[in-house]
Amino acid sequence: MSKNKQKILRNLSFLMGLMLILLSCEVNKIPDVSNIDVDLNTIRFDKILFEMDTTDVKSSFIKIESEHKAFTDIFFQHILPLKTPSSKSEVTFEQNLSKFINDEFCQSLYDTTQIVYPDVEGIQKDVKQMLKYSKYHFPELNVNKVYTYISEFGYQTFLFSHENGDGLGIGLDLFLNDYPYENFSAGNPAFSAYITRTFNKEHIAKKAADAIIDDIREWKSRDRLLDKMIENGKKQILLKSFLPRTQDSILFEYSQEQMDWVNNNEFNIWAHLLDEELIYETNRKKIKTLLEMSPSSIGMPLEAPGRTANFIGYKILQKYLERNPEITLDSLINIQDPQFILDNSRYKPRPSN
């Protein structure tokens, strides 16, 4: 090969590399959302409920229900199910409600919540900023109310519809920082340390974004690991887009040490999935810890956290977007073929030095 040809090829390689870098920067650019208006009203339903007049529960509740109809309907039927088909009369519901409010443990939980959250200005600010970014990508979103509540560890966050848009419910009793959750239900896997580690203020906006993302579309996937990791990767892409200034350890719900481990071992994780022929695996037992909350990923080093396949799914989606920067998030999440995304991403991580 002539020296001129070699020089031309080197220049082409340099230009292609530069283009990929520039495309990557464009994909990762944080948009300006300062002009996006979000009118958000935050209601301390936890205070409203626990400070109601229990000497006349019926009249007190009628007033609360008239002012917060949509929220009370879903809250007392599904989140704190005191109003169930088995409640044959309003009297039964009023009795159940009175017992809940006056219960010694619930009172203690409410008091703790008020100490941790004497106000919710920080929550309001973080959620509002998250909503601005979400509206930038999905202008049709109209979340304009936030209700904070206590449900005796029922739900962290949920999305519901009301007459003028959508509302977010945030269960403050599941964001109490160093609260001893394991003492509430000994042996309950839902209160394992690797899960409750994220029950804090820093994860509220992330969990709120989760509720919105779950509602954006019907997230269906087939049984293969590839299908599930790509779907979960799409959710992580949305999370990153809705919370672009939030550290990855919060978005992935990893400790910083775990986040460092997956970043440093991306090649090894991918190699493991290929070597063990797990990409197209459908056996749930074999792939469960690679996708779901767990202290580790079975078959990998002890340092490997759970959900490592989701991390790889996210990285594949990142590469796909870098190569196709014209693709909108709405278009991306509606691509039905995970194999198409994998093939066109040309995903090939390199070993770390």
Image (spheres, rainbow, N blue to C red):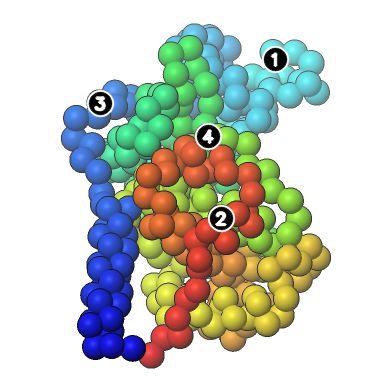
- Tell me if residue 257 can be seen: no
Mark 3 or mark 1: whose residue is earlier in sequence: 3
Amino acid at dot 4: Ile
Q: Residue 276: x and y, percent? A: 71, 80
Amino acid at dot 1: Val
Q: Compared to 254, does 304 lie above or below? A: below
Q: Compared to 236, does 145 lie above or below? A: above
Q: Residues within 10 Å of mark 2 (few under 14, many from 20)?
A: many
Amino acid at dot 2: Ile
**Badge nearest the viewer, 4 or 1:** 4
Q: Residue 90: x and y, percent? A: 69, 13
Q: Residue 50: x and y, percent? A: 47, 30
Q: Compared to 120, does 147 lie above or below? A: above
Q: Secondary structure at mark 3?
A: loop
Q: Residues within 10 Å of mark 3 (few under 14, many from 20)?
A: few
From the viewer's perspective, is 35 left or right of 261? left
**Badge nearest the viewer, 2 or 1:** 2
Quadrant where the N terminus sits is bottom left
Q: Residue at x 25, y 76 (%)?
A: 8
Residue bearing the label numbered 2? 341
Residue bearing the label numbered 1? 91
Residue bearing the label numbered 3? 37
Q: Nearer the viewer, residue 266 or 339?
A: 339
From the viewer's perspective, is 186 left or right of 42? right
Q: Secondary structure at mark 4?
A: helix
Q: Residue 317: x and y, percent? A: 48, 57
Q: Residue at x 38, y 90 (%)?
A: 353
Mark 3–mark 1 Cα distance, whole angstroms, equals: 44 Å
Amino acid at dot 3: Asp
Q: Nearer the viewer, residue 111 or 229?
A: 229
